[in-house]
Amino acid sequence: MAVTVKEMDGAELERLIETGAKVLADFYSKTCGPCKMLGFVLGDVAKEVDGVEIVKVCFEENPEAVKAHGVEGYPTMILFEGGAEKARLKGLQQKPLIVSTIAG
């Protein structure tokens, strides 16, 4: 079953991470061209992967989450599992790399 990409605020992201679930968080900006392209890529990734929550967190609207996770630019994707960061991808990435990162 495919997963869906959900928009989330920083507090919702923290609660989700605390559950220990596998979470791919995309920190993005609404005005960023590469971020918009990555949104389409993540939509395709979501059709192929199971067992992961893919969420988008707006950089400008969630400064606490950005600071808490040391996000320095966008787009930045962070994979969390078991409540901890497992991987980090910076910039626009291709679908195969994202899928292999999630698969671990």
Image: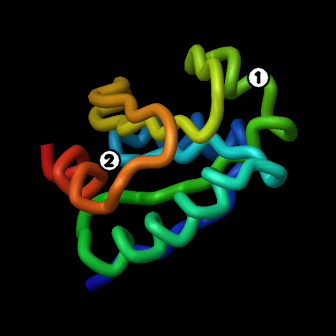
Give, as a three-letter code, the residue at label 2.
Lys
Left or right: 93, with 73 as reference point: left
Residue 36 lies left or right of residue 64; in this view the side is left
In percent of width and height, residue 40 lies at: 53, 71
Quadrant into which the N terminus falls: bottom left
* Occupied quadrant, residue 37: bottom right
Rendered location of residue 28, percent (x, y): 67, 45
What x and y, as percent, mark residue 43? 47, 74
> From the viewer's perspective, is 54 left or right of 11?
left
Find the residue positioned furthest to the front.
Answer: 33
Q: What residue sits right under mark 1 in the picture? A: 64
The part of the image, by quadrant, that contains residue 78 is: top left
Taking depth in this image into account, of 15 and 22 the one nearest to the observer is: 22
Instruction: Between residue 11 and residue 66, name the one nearer to us.
Output: 66
Residue placed under numbered mark 2 in the picture: 22
Residue drawn 59% across the image and 40% down it: 75
**As drawn, 59 above or below 98:** above
Q: Is residue 89 above or below residue 8?
A: above
In the rendered view, does 6 fall on the left or right side of 63?
left
Q: Residues within 10 Å of mark 1 (few under 14, many from 20)?
A: some
At a point 54% along the width and 55% down the height, the residue shown is 55
* Tally of numbered tags: 2
The colour scheme used to paint the residues is rainbow
